[in-house]
Amino acid sequence: MLAALTIATAVAALVLAAWCGFAAYRDQPTKDWHFIGMAVVSLLALVQLVVGIVQLARGERPDQGTAIFVGYLIGTVCCVPAAALLSLGERTRWGSVTVAAGGVVLAVLQVRLYDIWGG
């Protein structure tokens, strides 16, 4: 795995979580700007999925098993879009809380991916 990409994705996810957490604190739902931030974070996770698949195709293997690594890769790609869909259904401050929680979960998944790969 690319350590710089993992760090960038985790930091972006935490920034998104803080931003949406602040919106929830101000009793605001997710807005268009938040969805742009979610798209950026989701794009980073998608790039990481592609990098991980390419590394597996080249013959590199994670320390803790390929199946668990691929499972975590898929989970990272699905995490923020799932939170975005839930926030669309809940147009109150709790939608912002949902996205903030999704950002924190994505950051934790990044740390776990790095650990699975052997970092």
Image: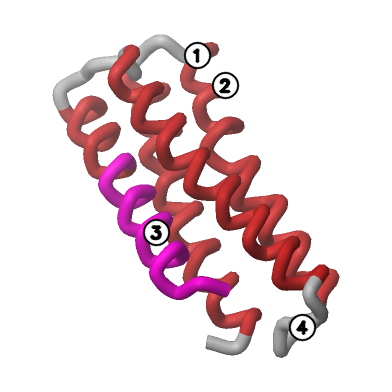
At label 1, the amino acid type is Leu
At label 4, the amino acid type is Arg
Rounded to the nearest angstrom, the CA distance separating label 4 from label 2 is 33 Å
Q: Main secondary structure of the magenta part?
A: helix
The x, y position of residue 115, in whole percent, is: 56, 81
Q: Is residue 8 magenta?
A: yes
Q: Which residue is mark 3?
A: 10
Rounded to the nearest angstrom, the CA distance separating label 3 from label 4 is 22 Å
Q: Is residue 25 magenta?
A: no
Residue 100, picture quadrant: top left
Front residue (pair 1, 89): 1
The x, y position of residue 28, in whole percent, is: 24, 16
Front residue (pair 102, 34): 34
Q: Which residues are magenta?
A: 1-16
Q: Which residue is mark 1?
A: 88
The x, y position of residue 42, in whole percent, is: 51, 39
Q: Which residue is mark 4?
A: 61
At label 2, the amino acid type is Leu
Q: Are marks 3 and 4 in contact (CB under 8 Å)?
A: no
